[in-house]
Amino acid sequence: MSAPILKFVGVSRVYHSGDEDVRALDEVSFHVDAGELVAVMGPSGSGKSTLLALAGGLDVPTSGSITVGGTEVTTLAPTSLAQLRRDRIGYVFQDFNLISELTAAENVALPRELAGVRPRAARREAIAALAEVGVDHLAHRFPEQMSGGQQQRIAIARALVGERHLVLADEPTGALDSQTGEAVMEVLRARVDAGAAGVLVTHEPRYAGWADRTIFLRDGRVVEGTTSPVPLEQLLRGHS
Ligand code: ADP
Ligand code: MG
């Protein structure tokens, strides 16, 4: 039995826009154990990115409880939350979020240096993470000198570097051709098999097939959980 690394209990997130309330997540409960990869699928606007941002401590729920490695993150002091995010959580953003003034290796080494790892060791770890996703030959390139797919792999290396217990990825295969997409899934899967917990937002059943379970969101609610993403395909019409 492995302990849940990520646990949502009755989590809701309500956005106020004008005099309208948007219930982006509505009483969502689920957990992800160590060694488990969970896919999150659902139409555009169903709350997938909101769920991931909450799991990564980038947003705060309106109500409910979220624990990461047993720590309640919703009441954590900002500095402790920042430390948890930096040291324990890897986050792959849909739009990469690489720092344009830094090379690939520097982008990947940065979270380690911020975590107090010495520059030489951080660089070594960065090169290893880049090699893991097959782009160590791009270590000296700046983001603008790389294709979208290459940048995406740098972003994935940055999310995996060090000892992240929780890896969160929002459509990490979006900018990739299918061969590269499969390669990225292999890396994510290997990291999870080595003991991390992973959450993958995707609209492609092919990639969700790498997960142990799929959670399906609609209008902010979990509508279906299944071990096989394939029967959900028809529910995905109107995805983004
Ligand atoms: P998905 O990633 O599944 O497309 P999101 O989590 O981005 O969905 O959005 C869920 C719902 O919350 C949508 O209705 C969206 O318009 C709304 N939403 C997301 N972010 C905000 C925000 N910052 N302010 C107001 N509404 C938001
Ligand atoms: Mg989204």
Image (spheres, helix red, strand yellow):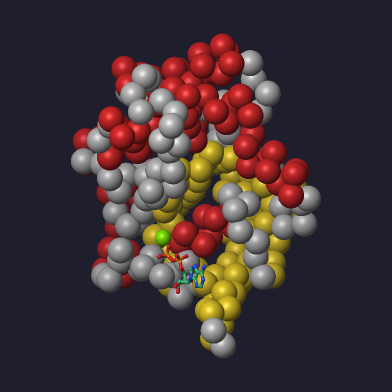
Classify residue 31 as left or right of residue 185.
Answer: right
View quadrant of ligand 2: bottom left
Classify residue 174 as left or right of residue 28.
Answer: left
Nearest the eye: 136 or 185: 136
Residue 180, image x, y percentages: 25, 35
Q: Residue at x 40, y 43 (%)?
A: 96
Q: Residue at x 75, y 43 (%)?
A: 80
- Residue 64 in the image: above or below residue 18: above
Seen from this angle, which residue lies furthest bottom? 19
Residue 73, image x, y percentages: 71, 52
Q: Residue at x 77, y 51 (%)?
A: 76
Q: Choose top left, top right, bottom left or bottom right for residue 173.
A: top left
Classify residue 203 as left or right of residue 168.
Answer: left
Q: Choose top left, top right, bottom left or bottom right for residue 228.
A: bottom left
Q: Residue at x 21, y 41 (%)?
A: 178
Nearest the eye: 12 or 150: 150
Residue 215 visible at all: no
Which quadrant would the C terminus be assigned to in this image?
A: bottom left
Which quadrant would the N terminus be assigned to in this image?
A: top right
Nearest the eye: 153 or 218: 153
- Residue 8 in the image: above or below residue 126: below
Residue 25 visible at all: yes
Residue 175, image x, y percentages: 28, 45
- Residue 87 in the image: above or below residue 62: above
Question: Number of callouts in the render?
Answer: 0
Residue 90, image x, y percentages: 53, 39
Classify residue 183 as left or right of residue 132.
Answer: left
